Image (tube, helix red, strand yellow):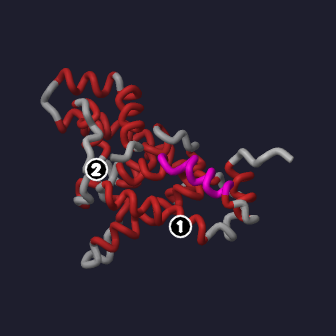
Amino acid sequence: MAEPTSDLELFEAWRQGDQRAGRELFARHFDAIYRFFRSKIDDESAEELTQQTFMGCVKGRERYRGDASFRTYLYTIARNRLYTHIRDRNRRDAVIEVGQQSVADLDLGSPTQQIAVKREHQLLLRAMRRLSLDMQIALELHYWEGLSVREIAEVIETPEGTIKRRLQRARARLDELITELTEDIELRRSTTANFDQWAGELRARLAQKG
């Protein structure tokens, strides 16, 4: 019998007691989930919430039936953990609309290790952290993780048409923020003209620990 290789095959094997399959599944997705948190909060909290996300997956594995992709399932747990973390930090503001706030507005901290080594990395990360959280998450899942509009809609619990419009607005708003955050014309040009390059490099660095 061939060993399970797809996410769903590994998940089903793990659910039936194959611990190796569970370890392989988590190893496959650990960097992406850690990156999801690290672009928004400090390193210590990112590590803690990454562990909580996988623990949530363990506890809820009997409820997952494969209707959505495993990645969608994981990112949905991660988003819920992040928003719970934010609400817990802002208990005095019980009506806070987390998804409409930015990381900068919420003062969530930043990665403690030097990840943005080039000025373009620094500017791009600063701009991303000034998008609303729902916009930032949609943009990252689309450009960094390759999720489809339908998958992003499931993670953010928003209609697909809204996600399409949000992605368009987020990309345009990112360019506006890059312009607002620096008076260096050449830095602006380099960051926007080579967006895919800088975003790809930043993606890789955000998954690196220590």
Task: Please identify the quarter of the rendering in which residue 94 is found.
Answer: bottom left
Q: Residue at x 25, y 33 (%)?
A: 117
What residue is pinned by disc 1? 55
Q: Residue 80, labelled with which disc?
A: none
Is residue 166 at least partly visible in the picture?
yes
x, y percentage for residue 80?
46, 65
For the residue pair 189 and 125, the one nearer the viewer reads as 125
Badge 2 marks a residue whose secondary structure is: loop
- Relative side of 139 to 149, left or right: left
Q: Residue at x 35, y 48 (%)?
A: 39
Mark 1 or 2 closer to N-term? 1
- Relative side of 34 to 159, left or right: left
x, y percentage for residue 115?
29, 40
The residue stretch that appears in magenta:
20-31
For the residue pair 172 and 55, the one nearer the viewer reads as 55
Badge 1 marks a residue whose secondary structure is: helix
x, y percentage for residue 104?
24, 54
* Residue extending farthest front: 20
